[in-house]
């Protein structure tokens, strides 16, 4: 039985309180199973011999939050905690003892980190402000309608993680602070958008596999970064639209997530730099 329970209480027409609890389970995938081998006397056994070594991954999650919502403003604040048990990790080479056969063998591929593998806790907030359409005086040209929308997201997260016997006081690849911001200004024929994404530095997943693969060139951490995006649209009429999109305006270079934790991982996984798009859309409706 995997319960998922949510309790919400509406304090009044603007405020609402909620609590959510959930449990989940994930069994070893076919890929993990066929890529895990037991090795005895220098010979690789059938992958099926390792299936019994995989325990299902179990998750427990608890979240509580409060929301305020009116016609123009929405604010949501929540706190969360999550525990994950028996995560199946790649790149494992370990000696396993079989009490029935009174012999030991090597297990390579995927294996469970016993017990509590990962715990995460933190808080996050969402804020939306939408003015709706409002008139702006243009002097002799009369009035024009405009609309302003502002959105922001902030998350603070902490945790710990285990890879076999190793324990880290952070969840690898997870920033402690993540902030996102977007401002949109829309007129009758124009639409402007500015957006920003920022995250603090993270520890690399290569830390968990450095000893196994003896890779001295692996990055141990990645620095913080911020990127900006810009968009401009001009509606010529009901059918034609001119646009300009610029992603990563200041051409910031930063690393992406580590892939699998295998010897084939990139030492540094660079993400896209500045991308500029100009174009015309035609709508037949």
Image (cartoon, rainbow, N blue to C red):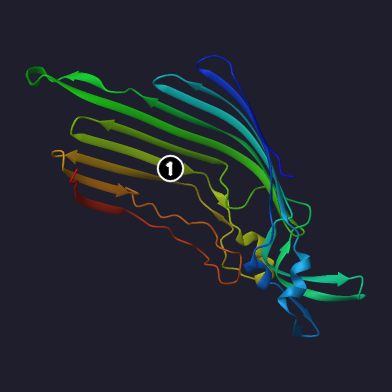
Quadrant of res 52 = bottom right
User: Which secondary structure, mark 1?
Assistant: strand
Who is closer to the viewer here, 177 or 134?
Answer: 134
Residue at the spot 79% in from the left edge and 52% down from the top edge: 115
Image position, residue 75 (x, y; %)? 49, 25
Q: Which residue is mark 1?
A: 197
Q: Taking 201 as reference, is 186 left or right?
A: left
The quadrant the N terminus occupies is top right
**Residue at the top extreme, as displayed:** 12
Q: Is residue 228 above or below residue 42?
A: above
Quadrant of res 74 = top left
Q: Taking 92 as reference, is 67 left or right?
A: left
The quadrant the C terminus occupies is top left
Residue at the spot 48% in from the left edge and 57% down from the top edge: 255
Q: Taking 70 as reference, is 85 left or right?
A: right
Quadrant of res 86 = bottom right
Image position, residue 31 (x, y; %)? 62, 68
Residue at the spot 66% in from the left edge and 73% down from the top edge: 34
């Amino acid at each position: 039985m995997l319960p998922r329970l949510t309790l919400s209480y509406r304090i009044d027409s603007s405020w609402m309180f909620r609590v959510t609890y959930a449990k989940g389970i994930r069994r070893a995938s076919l890929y993990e199973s066929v890529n895990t081998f037991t090795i005895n006397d220098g010979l690789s056994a059938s992958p099926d011999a390792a299936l019994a070594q995989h325990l299902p991954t179990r998750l427990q999650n608890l979240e509580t939050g409060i929301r305020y919502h009116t016609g123009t403003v929405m604010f949501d604040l929540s706190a969360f905690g999550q525990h994950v048990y028996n995560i199946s990790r790649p790149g494992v080479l370990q000696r396993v003892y079989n009490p029935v056969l009174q012999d030991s063998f090597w297990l390579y591929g995927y294996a469970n980190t016993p017990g509590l593998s990962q715990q995460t806790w933190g808080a996050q907030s969402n804020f939306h402000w939408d003015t709706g359409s409002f008139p702006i005086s243009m002097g002799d040209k009369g009035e024009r309608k405009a609309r302003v929308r502002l959105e922001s997201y902030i998350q603070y997260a902490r945790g710990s993680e285990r890879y076999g016997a190793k324990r880290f006081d952070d969840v690898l690849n997870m920033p402690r602070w993540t902030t996102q911001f977007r401002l949109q200004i829309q007129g009758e024929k124009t639409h402007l958008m500015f957006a920003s994404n920022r995250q603090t530095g993270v520890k690399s997943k290569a830390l968990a596999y450095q000893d196994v693969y003896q890779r001295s060139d692996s990055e141990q951490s990645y620095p913080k970064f911020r990127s900006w995006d810009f968009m401009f649209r001009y509606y010529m009429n009901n059918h034609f639209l001119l646009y300009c999109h610029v992603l990563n305006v200041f051409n910031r270079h930063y690393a992406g997530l580590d892939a699998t934790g295998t010897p084939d991982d990139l030492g540094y996984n660079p993400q896209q730099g500045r991308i500029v798009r100009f174009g015309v859309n035609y709508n037949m409706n």
